[in-house]
Amino acid sequence: MHQWSLKMSTGDELHPKAMDLAEMAFRYRRRGDDGKAKKFFLEALQLEMQAAHLLPPFKDSEPSRSILFRSAASLAYNGGDYETANRLIAFGLSGYPPAEIEEELKNLYEDINFMRHLSAKGIELEEEQWLMTLAGNAISYGKTMADIFLYRVERLSTLFYRTVERLLKLPYRTSAGVSKEVKDQYSLFINAFLPSSFGVSLQIGRPNPQFSLFPNEEPKRQVEPSKVIDEVFKCFEILEGNNPAALKDVIEDDLYYENFIALAKQIAPDGDDVTLVGFTTIRNGQERPIALRKSRQQLRDEPNLIRERKEDSEDAVKTTYKGILRFANSPITPRSKFGTVKLKDPETNFEHTIKVPIALMKDVVQPFYEERVAVLVYEKDGKKILNEINLDT
């Protein structure tokens, strides 16, 4: 145990000791030992607080005073002591902080309020984060078209929850949204935007057992968030590899499999605006990256990737129709294999009736309602079966 006396007389002695403890705390956090990390953060906090309070709230104490209070507040934040962190921010703002330090103190205040909000709802964030980055002709430093980015974040969120449901061995959900039970156990948060290419950090929130009415009772169905992320990464790696058809061995359920392929196509690069979609997770200080470079067209042309249906036989004709998606109807009974959509040609007002595999109906097709889309179908015996749908850009 590393303890230094809190009776040191100068900030020049206190601050370096606090930073040594903070470095040890971050080291334990990178190793996944949150208990020891928190302990060292709070030890460092005591030293940094004493150093900050040695300086009076006068102009000639700046910028040292506000920097020390910002540092102390950050240590309290990392140690989970949000009340102390807020008080330290108030002390830092009460003097004469330079504009950039004042802005950092206010930003930290917002972060703390967010964490306090989660804490009040009984949610705690997992330490592990996973990053999604985009690169391509439509991406510049810290900028991209909103539709390109938000479209993929939405599909990634859908894919994440479908993976949770699959690992929990829940029956494939053909209607309604994700259950409250699943969302409460696996809340998904967007953390921050990353400007190098363009990216976002995602984090999973879990109920804090201290807030449970029955803290000693295990949930009936549970899978660790890290396992969900590992499963998503494994499926992406197989899809990007030389034998993507092997994914059928991982996702055995036909509906979950077809749903994953359809969502993965929509997340994948389009080959022009977006040429790469990258994912990285950091666990115990080790990075695990995966880059999706295969375009939607390449995935579409992969042999044996989609499980064959009799409607998709070789003598079926592939046709692309464009128009406004005006109608989307899911089947009433879960045994039904297809839903139905109508695609209206705005120039001729002719409506195409297209059958949609049930695995694609809820997550892949219905979000395009009232949008102008391009639909790839298989036509046989007068029936049109949807294979893929995208925005008509």
Image (cartoon, grey):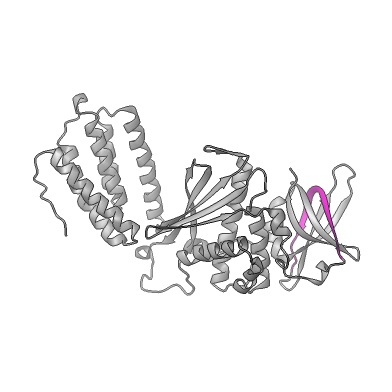
Q: Is residue 157 left or right of residue 184?
A: right
Q: Is residue 180 visible?
A: no
- Where in the figure is residue 74, as x and y percent of width and height? 30, 44
Which quadrant would residue 109 be assigned to in this image?
top left
Question: Which residue appears at 61% of the width and 71% of the height?
Answer: 251
Question: Which residue appears at 17% of the width and 40% of the height?
Answer: 51
Residue 293's place in the image compared with 260, above or below, is above
Please state which of residues 291 and 380 is positioned toward the viewer in this rendering: 291
- Where in the figure is residue 184, as x and y percent of width and height? 48, 62
Residue 286's place in the image compared with 251, above or below, is above
Please state which of residues 385 and 237 is positioned toward the viewer in this rendering: 237
- Where in the figure is residue 101, as x and y percent of width and height? 32, 32
In the image, residue 322 lies in the stretch drawn in magenta: yes
| Main secondary structure of the magenta stretch | strand
Question: Which residue appears at 41% of the width and 53% of the height?
Answer: 118
Which quadrant would residue 336 be assigned to in this image?
bottom right
Which quadrant would residue 258 be assigned to in this image?
bottom right
Please state which of residues 297 and 376 is positioned toward the viewer in this rendering: 297
Q: Quadrant of the C terminus?
A: top right
From this viewpoint, which residue is outermost toward the top?
59
In the image, residue 167 lies in the stretch drawn in magenta: no
Q: Is residue 194 left or right of residue 375?
A: left
Residue 53's place in the image compared with 322, above or below, is above
Question: Which residue appears at 67% of the width and 56% of the height?
Answer: 265
- Where in the figure is residue 139, as x and y percent of width and height? 59, 40
Q: Is residue 62 visible?
A: yes
- Residue bounds of the magenta highlight: 316-332
Q: Quadrant of the N terminus?
A: bottom left
Q: Is residue 184 left or right of residue 120?
A: right
